[in-house]
Amino acid sequence: MSIKSQFQRQLWQAIDRINTLPIAAQLTPNTVPLHRTSISNYVCYRSAIALKLSSAWQQTPLDIAHQLTEALLTLSQESADTIGINFTVEVLPPGWILFRLGDRALATYLQECFKIPYFPSVSPNDLNDKFHPKGGRGNREKSQHNQPDSDQLFPIQYIHARCCSLLRLADEQGLIEITDTGGGEDVGDGRDGGDGGAGEAGEAGGDKEELFPVTTHQPPIMIVSPNPIPWLQDTGDSDRESVRLRLTHPAEWDLIVQLFDLLDVMSASDCQRWVKQGLIVSEACNQFYKFCRIWGEVKIHDLPLAQARLGLIGVTQVVLRSLLQEQLGVSAPRVL
């Protein structure tokens, strides 16, 4: 699901296509340099691979960058195993390669996030083997030794439960329709229909083990209607390049890019970075719910915006559940 890992693989294939010098053979997709950046309200990924290859290939970075972009275009036309979202590629001096995602691509990717795989029968030990690919008994013991404690994970678990509560509330009020196989009653989830802040995570009292009892792994809550989520503003012309993402508030934008970063680090990193970025996403979700209303006037006068914001809550819930259950092998609570 990671955009970064998909772009890295595309660049790696392009390098192999145009040059077989030893340095190219030594590269793997994960070692291709690529970093997310934001330029003029676009999500972009920038690579310095042409600068890295310049000395070994005895060519200027700019020439290498242009060759790689041409190879990327050829690969996308030849292979069915390509990124399923639209993006543009630019070459910038002295040899940067820039992947730019437009609003339509962001909407497509947000919708695709609902398809993150769910592994209902995976045990925690299997998870350690799966997400620490070097494997081996010693590596498993090391990864378990470095596992975060419950205090570190509590804010992430709380926000996951908060998202579940909000989705169920929205379903009850007819804003969306969900599938929910979990049980239990919610406590303090704002059932009066108000827009209370999600910042209660730091104020939640009581014993954490009682608040979030250990449960079996459960699938995420899925939004089945509307499908797709109305991420884009309806311009009446689906082919117009000027179509814009409905989510334009800075807090919405920050939550989106932090979710992308979490998916990126989960695809090629260690559990400590997963948790650190998960905490950043949790705080971004707090700020999003604090500043971006869903109920009240928004629900009445701009239902598509309310549904798009609920869609972002749904994506947050899916990604955090994947982090907690699939990556870390711990409970992803559904009730507050």
Image (spheres, rainbow, N blue to C red):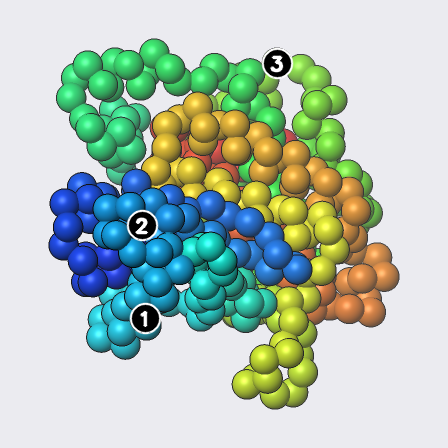
Q: Nearer the viewer, residue 327 or 175?
A: 327
Near mark 1 (Cα within 10 A), the count class, few <14, some 14-19 or many ≥20, is some
Residue 207's tag is 3
Query: Please, is residue 112 above or below residue 333 in the view?
Result: below
| Residue on which disc 2 sits | 54
Kindly tell me whether residue 80 is visible in this rendering.
no
Query: Is residue 129 depicted above or below 82 in this figure?
Result: above
Q: Real-space Cα distance between discs 1 and 2?
A: 17 Å
Q: Amino acid at mark 1?
A: Glu
Q: Quadrant of the C terminus?
A: top right
Taking the spot 68% from the left edge, 52% from the top edge, the residue there is 252
**Residue position marked by numbered label 1 in the rendering:** 70
Residue at 45% in and 18% down = 148
Whether residue 15 is visible here, answered yes or no, is yes
SS at mark 1 in the image: helix
- Quote the CA–CA distance across marks 2 and 3: 58 Å
Q: Earlier in the sequence, mark 2 or mark 3?
A: 2
Question: Which quadrant of the structure image shows residue 266?
Answer: top left
Q: In screen coordinates, is 103 left or right of 319?
A: right
Total number of numbered labels? 3
